[in-house]
């Protein structure tokens, strides 16, 4: 089975949250937006030896409007991993009275936890329910069985544990149940830089560690390893997931040495130690459906190692929930497996996700190149500034800095849309909960972009806050007419001759210097002029961007795209 969704109300700082999960789910979001609370809940319910879990006063959200109200409501939705699995699996059939068939013909069961605090007393009930939340007569044995079958293994940073060098401490030894496990743990500590490194590491030590790893994988991980054989990818698969992990080999090929890199074997050892640490003193059943929780792996692993780690992790037949701040990590996953968590002003948490069915294969290809490959960190932004090309990127990034605005620190990323198309970018931003603003030239093409972008606005969204239309045919003519004529005259070689048209001056300057080159010259002059030298329309656009990044959508005097008339 697989954990398909979680509903949370009143837990920690979360007033209300619903999140859908896949076999692998990447969760992104800013600090304080609920990621840690979600992990804490999963670890408390499914990662503890205490079954069923209990809550403490600190777990209840404080509602300032109702300070005496202390209630937690949790619902875990489980689904059979494959169609018809419930009917074929004896393990799953023990829950027959709780399974409910959904509209998609998959069977689901719902595990509820309700807790209420009155004074100093906390009462908590655990039960199964139907899809509408109606109570189903439940017994504690079935609840415990469900929790044991879905153990949460929180793979924490190995460097955060005991840092004693050399042999394992007494507190560490209790987790490792035989000589094989102790050998893996000692070798992993060495590889992570915690052991005595004065004499280096011998081939014999590596060999014995790999022998131990083979034994443990054969003994404990038969249900997890090699989740699937290689499958040929479709065009949509390639576009949705630009970085393929398949080429790094299977678990068995790594263990048997058919893969020549010792690095991959070392990472297997480190991963195995993390799994043993996550298991702790629990006795996990031989057959179970583990849920791996992973946090900020990129903070300790070199990007190359990170790709190997992700490849090995993918081959484990277990559900994975990954919290990451790495664009490279996200590129290993389909867009549909990314959840962007956003905390609203009223403490509701919305988990945004992309529906790839709303995009054509060509749209996905364009998004993959222009966002996921060339600008992978854009998916973490609060607001996108959509511009036509490279010239605008140079100008807007530097002009904002002259005004004292650090766009990246404000959560604003600039993306060009001329090659990708504005529509797929705006659709992506909307589905992922990212605000956006589009700037377009004043020519016919720009007018069309504005029309397309306007069609994506909701009724309550400000047109001025989302659209800027230049009052000239392109960015070069706009800056020529707004205080930067001298830049074009000097670069064109015409100087201040009066018998040369604006169009000819700009065309000659572009030919001699290139559009991005002219942008650098404009920035140089703007730097000398200071904020007041930046055109008013651009200054207003930056103000809109700051407000959008802060979540402010409204504009009481909204009557069309922002422009100078």
Image: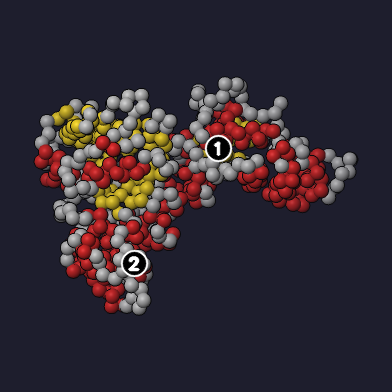
| Drawn side of residue 228 relative to residue 369, left or right | left
Distance between the alpha carbons at the discs numbered 1 and 2 = 50 Å
Residue 552, position as x, y percentages in the image: 52, 30
| Drawn side of residue 459 relative to residue 168, left or right | right
- Quadrant that contains the N terminus: top left
Query: To which quarter of the image does residue 167 belong?
Result: bottom left
Crowding around mark 2 (Cα neighbors within 10 Å: few <14, some 14 to 19, many 20+) is some
- Quadrant that contains the C terminus: top right
Determine the secondary structure under disc 2: loop
Q: Front-most of 368 and 278? A: 278
| Pointer 2 residue | 194
Residue 521 circle label: none
Crowding around mark 1 (Cα neighbors within 10 Å: few <14, some 14 to 19, many 20+) is many
Query: To which quarter of the image does residue 130 belong?
Result: top left
Q: Residue 249, relative to residue 347: is it above or below?
A: below
**Residue at 34%, 44% in the rendered image:** 36
């Amino acid at each position: 089975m697989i954990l398909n969704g979680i509903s949370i109300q009143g837990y920690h700082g979360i007033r209300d949250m619903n999140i859908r999960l896949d076999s692998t789910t990447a969760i992104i979001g800013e600090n304080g937006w609920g990621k840690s609370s979600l992990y804490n809940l999963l670890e408390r319910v499914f990662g503890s030896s205490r079954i069923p879990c209990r809550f403490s006063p600190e777990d209840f959200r404080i509602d300032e409007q109702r300070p005496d109200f202390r209630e937690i409501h949790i619902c875990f939705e489980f689904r059979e991993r494959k169609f018809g699995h419930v009917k074929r699996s004896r393990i799953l059939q023990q829950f027959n009275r709780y399974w409910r068939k959904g509209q998609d013909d998959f069977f689901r069961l719902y595990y509820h936890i309700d807790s209420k605090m009155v004074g100093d007393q906390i009462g908590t009930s655990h039960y199964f329910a139907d899809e509408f939340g109606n109570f189903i007569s439940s017994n504690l044995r079935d609840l415990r069985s469900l929790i044991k079958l879905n153990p949460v293994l929180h793979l924490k940073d190995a460097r955060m544990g005991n840092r004693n060098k050399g042999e394992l401490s007494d507190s560490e030894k209790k987790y490792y149940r035989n000589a094989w496990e102790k050998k893996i743990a000692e070798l992993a500590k060495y590889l992570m830089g915690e052991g005595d490194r004065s004499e280096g590491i011998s081939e014999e030590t590596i060999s014995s560690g790999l022998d131990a790893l083979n034994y443990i994988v054969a003994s404990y991980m038969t249900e997890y390893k090699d989740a699937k054989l290689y499958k040929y990818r479709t065009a949509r698969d390639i576009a949705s997931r630009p970085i393929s992990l398949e080429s790094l080999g299977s678990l068995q090929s790594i263990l048997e040495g058919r893969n020549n890199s010792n690095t991959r074997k070392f990472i297997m050892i480190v991963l195995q130690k993390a799994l043993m640490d996550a298991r702790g003193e629990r006795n996990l059943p031989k057959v179970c459906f583990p849920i791996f929780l992973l946090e900020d792996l990129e903070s300790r692993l070199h990007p190359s190692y990170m790709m190997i780690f992700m490849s090995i992790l993918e081959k484990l037949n277990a559900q994975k929930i990954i919290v990451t701040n790495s664009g490279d990590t996200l590129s290993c996953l389909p867009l549909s497996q990314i959840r962007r968590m956003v905390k609203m002003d009223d403490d509701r948490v919305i988990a945004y996700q992309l529906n790839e069915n709303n995009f054509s294969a060509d749209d996905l290809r364009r998004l993959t190149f222009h966002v996921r490959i060339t600008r992978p960190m854009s998916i973490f932004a609060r607001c996108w500034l959509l511009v036509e090309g490279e010239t605008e990127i140079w100008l807007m990034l530097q002009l904002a800095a002259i005004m004292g605005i650090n766009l990246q620190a404000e959560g604003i990323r600039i993306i060009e849309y001329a090659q990708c198309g504005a529509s797929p970018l705006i659709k992506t931003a909307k589905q992922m909960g990212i605000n956006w603003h589009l700037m377009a030239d004043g020519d016919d093409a720009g007018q069309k972009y504005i029309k397309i972008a306007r069609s994506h606005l909701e009724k309550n969204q400000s047109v001025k806050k989302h659209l800027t239309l230049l009052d000239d045919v392109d960015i070069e003519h706009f800056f020529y007419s707004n205080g930067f004529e001298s830049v074009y005259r000097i670069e064109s070689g015409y100087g201040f001759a009066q018998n040369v048209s604006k169009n000819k001056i700009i065309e000659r300057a572009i030919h001699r210097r290139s559009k991005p080159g002219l942008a650098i010259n404009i920035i140089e002059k703007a730097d000398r002029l200071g904020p007041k030298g930046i055109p008013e329309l651009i200054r207003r656009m930056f103000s809109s961007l700051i407000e959008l990044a802060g979540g402010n959508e409204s504009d009481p005097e909204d009557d069309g795209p922002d422009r100078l008339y």
